[in-house]
Image (cartoon, grey):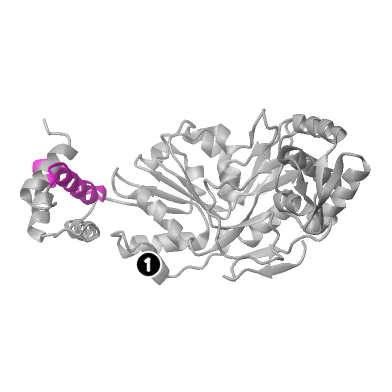
C-alpha cells in the first residue's frame, strides 16, 4: 500500500493520491480503456476534466492521453487553462463502442481487490471502542433497562452478530436501528468500485453510503469516498440472490451485494424468518462469514473471490429463535437479547417522552387509564410501540376535527378503538 495519512477525526486511514499509473494498482490497459470510454460518453473534455471524472491525478491522465494519442484514438482540439482539450477520433469512437459492448463502466478508476481488502481490515468494526456513557446517549430516546444496555454495548465491543427477539411491538427494529448512533461519528472510506481480473464491482452507493462533507485536501485519493459507517436494513424482500454479486447483463459490470456495501458498518436483517430466503438457506450461506469474518462471491463463469465480512449483523425477529434455526447457527450469534413487554413504570416513561416530543400535557391519571384499557379491557400486554402509536392517533383525530390535541380519557378511548382489534 502507498503512503497513508490520518483524516481529521483520526479514526480512518487512507492511501494518498497515486502519482503514476503503476501506483493505482490497476493495469495500464484497463485505465486506457476506461479513459477512452469516459471521453466517448462525455464528449470533448480537457485533460483536467477527464482526470476529475476518473478521480485520478492530471499527471496520470496525461500519461494515458499520450498513449491514446499515439494510437490515434483521440486528438487535441485546443487548449484551456494550460491543458489540452481532447476528443475521440473516428477510430477512437469505434474502439470505444467495442469496449462498451464488453463493459459499460466509466468514470472513477476502481481500486484493486487487494487494496480494498486491506482498507476494510484497517477500518474494521471489530475494534470499535464504546463505553456505558456512549451507549446511554445512543439509546436515551428509548426506555431500556441497564442490563439490556450493557448487553448491547458488549455486543458492539465484540463486533459479532446480535439476535434481538421477543414479542411483536417491543422495539426490536427501533433498537437495532439505534445501534447505528454508536457508529455515526466514525467515518470510513468506501471505494467507487473494485477491479478483479478486468471485472468491475460497483461498491459506493449513495442510497446506502452517506458521504461526509469534510474537506479532504489535494492529497486525497478521490477513488475513495469518505462516508459515515453504513447502515443497511433488509426485511421480507431479502432473497438468496441479493447475497451475491449482481451482474447487470446490459452494463456488463457488477453491483456489490448488501453485505459488501455494509462492510465496516451495520447490517440489520429485520423480521428474520419472514424473508423470501429461508432461514436454512441463509444459515448455509453465512455459516463461514459469521464464523471466520470472510465471504466468498462468485463472478460470472464461476470464479470465486474472497472478501472481508466485516460488519455487525443484527437479526431481529418476533418468532421463536429455536424454531427458526439450529444450534449451529445460534452458536455463531454471540449475543442474544430478548426485548419483552413493558412494565407499567416503563409505559409511563415512554408516554411522557412521546408527549414531550409532541408538546402535549401528560397526566399520570390518563396514562393509568390507558394501561387499564389495554391490560384489563382489551387483555393485551403493554408493548413499546403502543404509547407512540396511540398518542399519534390522538393527534391525528385532533387535526381532523381542527382542534388542539389533548390527551384525556375520551381521546385515549377513541384512539384505542381505532388501534386495537375489538375483542369478541
Tell me the quarter of the image containing the C terminus: top left
Residue 182 location in percent, x, y? 45, 62
Q: In percent of the image, x 29 and y 44: which residue is there? A: 167
Residue 197 visible to an observer of this rendering = no
Q: Main secondary structure of the magenta part?
A: helix
Q: In the displayed structure, does residue 66 sit left or right of residue 297? A: right
Along the line of sight, the residue nearer the viewer: 73 or 265 = 73
Along the line of sight, the residue nearer the viewer: 420 or 401 = 401
Against 131, residue 231 (above or below) is: above
Callout count? 1
Against 117, residue 318 (above or below) is: above
Q: In percent of the image, x 74 and y 45: which residue is there? A: 195
Q: Which residue is mark 1?
A: 137
Count neighbours of disc 1 (C-alpha within 10 A) and say few if under 14, some if 14 to 19, many if 20 or more: few
Residue 80 location in percent, x, y? 78, 54
Which region shows up in magenta?
374-402
Tell me the quarter of the image containing the N terminus: bottom right
Residue 122 location in percent, x, y? 65, 62
Where, by quadrant of the figure, is residue 10 drawn? bottom right
Residue 417 location in percent, x, y? 12, 38
Q: In the displayed structure, does residue 387 sit left or right of residue 321? A: left
Query: Is residue 393 covered in magenta?
Result: yes
Q: Residue furthest right?
A: 70
Q: In percent of the image, x 46 and y 34: which residue is there? A: 237
Where, by quadrant of the figure, is residue 255 drawn? top right
Amino acid at each position: 500500500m502507498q503512503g497513508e495519512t490520518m483524516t481529521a477525526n483520526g479514526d480512518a486511514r487512507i492511501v494518498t493520491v497515486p502519482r503514476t499509473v503503476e501506483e493505482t494498482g490497476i493495469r495500464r490497459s484497463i485505465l486506457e480503456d476506461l479513459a477512452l470510454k469516459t471521453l466517448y460518453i462525455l464528449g470533448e473534455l480537457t485533460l483536467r476534466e477527464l482526470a476529475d471524472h476518473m478521480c485520478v491525478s492530471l499527471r496520470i491522465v496525461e500519461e494515458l492521453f499520450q498513449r491514446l494519442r499515439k494510437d490515434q484514438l483521440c486528438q487535441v482540439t485546443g487548449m484551456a487553462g494550460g491543458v489540452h482539450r481532447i476528443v475521440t477520433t473516428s477510430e477512437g469512437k469505434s474502439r470505444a463502442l467495442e469496449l462498451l459492448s464488453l463493459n459499460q463502466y466509466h468514470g472513477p478508476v476502481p481500486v484493486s481487490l487487494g487494496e480494498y481488502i486491506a482498507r476494510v481490515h484497517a477500518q474494521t468494526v471489530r475494534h470499535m471502542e464504546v463505553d456505558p456513557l456512549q451507549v446511554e446517549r445512543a439509546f436515551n430516546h428509548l426506555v431500556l433497562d441497564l442490563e439490556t444496555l450493557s448487553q448491547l454495548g458488549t455486543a458492539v465491543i465484540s463486533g459479532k452478530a446480535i439476535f434481538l427477539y421477543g414479542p411483536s411491538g417491543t422495539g426490536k427494529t427501533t433498537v437495532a436501528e439505534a445501534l447505528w448512533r454508536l457508529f455515526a461519528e466514525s467515518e470510513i472510506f468506501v471505494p467507487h468500485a473494485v477491479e478483479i481480473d478486468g471485472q468491475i464491482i460497483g461498491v459506493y452507493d449513495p442510497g446506502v453510503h452517506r458521504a461526509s462533507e469534510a474537506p479532504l485536501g489535494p492529497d486525497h485519493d478521490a477513488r475513495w469516498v469518505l462516508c459515515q459507517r453504513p447502515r443497511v436494513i433488509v426485511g421480507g424482500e431479502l432473497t438468496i440472490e441479493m447475497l451475491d454479486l449482481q451482474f447487470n447483463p446490459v452494463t456488463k459490470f457488477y453491483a456489490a451485494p448488501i453485505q459488501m456495501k455494509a462492510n465496516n458498518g451495520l447490517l440489520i436483517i429485520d423480521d428474520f424468518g419472514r424473508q423470501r430466503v429461508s432461514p436454512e438457506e441463509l444459515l448455509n450461506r453465512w455459516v463461514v462469514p459469521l464464523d471466520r469474518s470472510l465471504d466468498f462471491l462468485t463472478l460470472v463463469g464461476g470464479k470465486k473471490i474472497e472478501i472481508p465480512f466485516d460488519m455487525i449483523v443484527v437479526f431481529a425477529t418476533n418468532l421463536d429463535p429455536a424454531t427458526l434455526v439450529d444450534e449451529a447457527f445460534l452458536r455463531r450469534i454471540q449475543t442474544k437479547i430478548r426485548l419483552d413487554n413493558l412494565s407499567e413504570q416503563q409505559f409511563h416513561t415512554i408516554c411522557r417522552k412521546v408527549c414531550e416530543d409532541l408538546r402535549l400535557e401528560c397526566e399520570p391519571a390518563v396514562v393509568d387509564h390507558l394501561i387499564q384499557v389495554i391490560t384489563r379491557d382489551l387483555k393485551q400486554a403493554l408493548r413499546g410501540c403502543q404509547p407512540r402509536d396511540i398518542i399519534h392517533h390522538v393527534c391525528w383525530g385532533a387535526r381532523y376535527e381542527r382542534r388542539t390535541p389533548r390527551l384525556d380519557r375520551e381521546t385515549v378511548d377513541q384512539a384505542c378503538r381505532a388501534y386495537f382489534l375489538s375483542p369478541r
